[in-house]
Amino acid sequence: MLNQNQIPLLDALKANAARPHAPFYTPGHKLGEGISQPLADLLGKAVFRADLTELADLDNLFAPQGVIQEAQQLAAAAFGASQTWFLVNGSTCGIEAAILATCGTGDKIILPRNVHSSAIAGLILSGAIPIFFNPEYDPVLDIAHSITPNTLQSALQLHPDAKAVLTVYPTYYGVCGDLRAIANITHQYNIPLLVDEAHGAHFAFHPELPTPALAAGADLTVQSIHKVLGAMTQASMLHVRGNRIDCDRITKALQLLQSTSPSYLLLASLDAARQQMALYGKMLMSRTLQLADEARTKISQIPGLSVLEMPQLEKSFGFIALDKTRLTVTVSGLGLTGFEADEILDEKFAVTAEFASLQHLTFIISLGNTSADIEQLVQAFTTLAKEYRRTNLIVKSHLWHELFTIQCHALCCSPREAFFAISEILPLTKANKRICAEIVCPYPPGIPVLMPGEVITKPVLDYLQQIQAMGGLISGCTDNSLRTLKVVKE
């Protein structure tokens, strides 16, 4: 039985940082002695003494046999996996590795159209052919939710030669589909279910949270430990359970995708976050859920505001769970867009949301939030509703649904072929009906509206311009001002 009290990697890093010696190895700042003074003033020098490289006692991420191996084994036990890999390039490299390990050039992979941009990068790297289908759409809230088992069944019946299924669980809004049924359907075709569980790393530690992906039958899941738990930004984990995934291919893919100079600060933060949750996770999540319930209850009572709740999801779509630590507030009843409300809350009340959309603001409530945070959030919304309400209500837009229905059928060639094709830059006015050669997505949440290989359509261009006009950020493309787009040269 593994002892979850242990933090082998963190302990080894602490010991090496404290060991008196003359360093003649990277990094160049040499235990913080050469660090910039303004940076040292901000962070202190102690952190730089622990910014070490692959010393003998610290193991090697790509061939772990010591403390990294021990830390990963402890993490596998804590999160319910057969094997766990630590990621220092974020969940992005985990999603890419999952696709590379299961799909080669020309292989089909079934996935919803609202995947993160990292999945598109995985398609480009692997040469896999995406078989897209639309997730369930909420026309009232203008939000794309999860996929349904029936939709997946139809996709697999049409494409029984697919090599894998990839889904998002939970969505950015915290919505969880019936993953157990999805896994059962996927396994009927003897292929693996890959899960982007970037926002669900906390699920394993409290019974009132949705079922973790691995427990629901997923073969592989990728979790951003930094997003909702206590690891440092960029620190994630990839977990495998069962025998449908070739673990050696995962290891080989990660060797291609991760830095050969991994940050031991990030790796140690994963070790520490695992120990924290293994020992105190239920207590921490109980407190987090209590804070989230308080925020949800009070904000839902403010005139002009509403919050995303499980009953409406269950009644309308049959979804089985909502992560209650994810709070989505609809502000269109105040006559404001989500982007306008986000700016007001940030600038006037020092309350910063995770992300804004046309009608909503979404907040992540985690183990790091306090009662004071919740009080500030509720008070900010109370004042927003009283002092910033407009009489002219905005018209709800269903462009999201329209454009993704179009984009599911708009792929002319594989993302890899389009990405590496000879391209040209065209003004936006001349890009209609051309084949896109780059990833274009509002961020966050990082869901591409256009990807290499898709035909550019007028609804897509209208949507992007609307997002930009409302104050949204367009990322991924060569021209972030969106005056031009990169297209495949004819």
Image (spheres, rainbow, N blue to C red):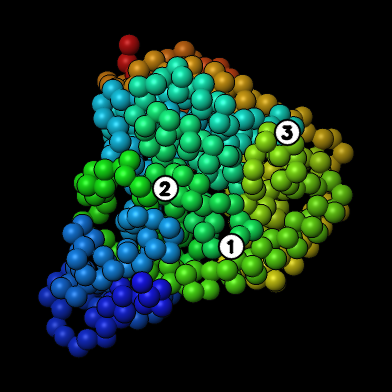
Amino acid type of the residue that numbered disc 2 sits on in the rendered structure: Thr
Specify the label residue 221 is tagged with. Answer: 2
**Mark 1 is on which residue type?**
His
- Where does residue 159 sit, x and y in percent of width and height? 41, 19
Give the residue pinned by disc 1: 206
Task: Rate crowding at label 3 as few (under 14), some (14 to 19) or many (20 or more) other CA atoms within 10 Å.
Answer: few
| Of the image marks 3 and 2, the number of the one nearer the N terminus | 2
Q: Residue 152 in the image: x percent, y percent?
A: 51, 27
| Labels 3 & 1 near each other (Cβ < 8 A) | no
Give the distance between the C-alpha atoms of the residues marked 3 and 1, in whole angstroms. Answer: 26 Å
Q: Where is residue 186 in the image (x, y as percent from the top left)?
A: 44, 32
User: Which quadrant holds the C terminus?
Assistant: top left
Badge 3 is on which residue? 316
In the rendered image, the vertical position of residue 280 relative to residue 327, given as above or below: below
Label 3 with label 2: CB-CB less than 8 Å = no
* Residue drawn at the location 47% of the way across and 70% of the way down: 278
Residue, x 31% and y 44% (percent of image)?
Answer: 243
Q: Where is residue 26 in the image (x, y as percent from the top left)?
A: 18, 69
Alpha carbon distance from label 2 to label 1: 18 Å
* Residue lying farthest to the bottom in this orientation: 20
Q: What element carries label 3?
A: helix
- Label 2, residues with CA under 10 Å away: few <14, some 14-19, many ≥20: many
